[in-house]
Amino acid sequence: MEPLARLQRALPELTPELRRAAHWVEQHPVEVGLWSMRKQAQALSLAPATMLRLARAAGYDSYDSFRAPFQQALHNGTGSMASRARGLQGGRENPRQTLALRHQQESALESVLRLNPVPALDAAAQCLLESRKVGFLGMGSSFGCAFQMHYAYQLMRGSGVLLNRSADVILELEGALGRQSVLVVISQAPYVRAAVQSMRQARERGVTVVALTDSALSPIAQGARHVLLFEAVPGERQPASFFHSMVGPVALAEHLLARIAAMGGDAVVQRLTRMESMLQAQQIYWREAGSA
């Protein structure tokens, strides 16, 4: 949503009071759309003028224009998977549905480059290269992306741990991970509670957190050493799918892995050579009889 994207860009310049208001807005989109500015300020124990300053910090002339996209989202009824599926069924014969999904996926890809300068990607890649052990955490729909990252990272480095349950995270934090380790967390709204709690536990133990998420205001981003972003919902008037797209996080993960390979030097090349030789010796990949 455009107001949240603008707040992401403005976040480093916001005062602590405005940052608190920005977090509340990101976590309460329904209230933003329905409540008056005064009632929202009361919920935060802030003056109504603070909410107006927040809107202006995001580049809006008034709070009404700031919250208009939130109201439009409520009007479209795109807040739940069931409501989005209902909307798709209403236009299932319309070829524009496929076109809309393509545009959503293209927007997600474009956002990875727009939201992540090369120095930010390189800093995160260097962080992983300097670590003793890297844990990869993705819960719910994000598990597939975490699995892919872990698999590729193991080919290059061999020091990764795939985490997919809260109990596993606790065990690994006490064992394989430590103060010279990194936890890569992948998550987008709606954020899985266990993922947020596990990230906070890791941070409390001194583990460096690298977040791949859909908002600089997300709970996954708070306290992370490095935050890499993707756009999860471009904000079309009608939903392109009942489910949130995974194109953004997967594309971002691939960019980060590519930078690790590019910056890893001879150690990465030698590891990949050994792994490829082992895979070939074990005949891991299918080949037709008699093929070269």
Image (tube, grey):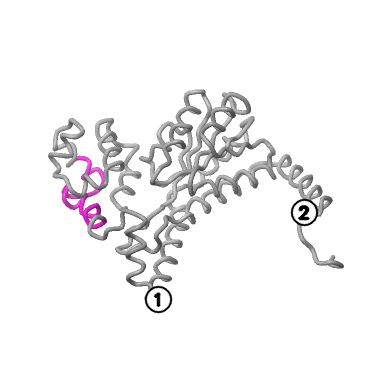
Q: Which residues are magenta?
A: 53-73
Residue located beneath label 1 in the image: 95
Which disc, if any, is residue 229? none
Asked whether, in this view, residue 178 is left or right of residue 79, the answer is right
* SS of the residue under disc 1: loop
Give the answer, above or below, for where 45 lies relative to 251. above
Q: Quadrant of residue 68?
A: bottom left
Asked whether, in this view, residue 248 is left or right of residue 285, the answer is left
- The question of residue 260 being in magenta is answered with no
Q: How many marks?
A: 2
Q: Quadrant of residue 160?
A: top right
Q: Nearer the viewer, residue 235 or 128?
A: 235
Residue located beneath label 2 in the image: 284
Tell me the residue at 24%/55% (across/down): 74
Cα gap from disc 1 to disc 2, whole angstroms: 41 Å
Q: Main secondary structure of the magenta part?
A: helix
Image coords of residue 88 (percent x, y): 36, 67
Q: Amino acid at mark 1?
A: Pro
The earlier-in-sequence mark between 1 and 2 is 1
Q: Amino acid at mark 2?
A: Ile
Residue sitting farthest toward the right: 290
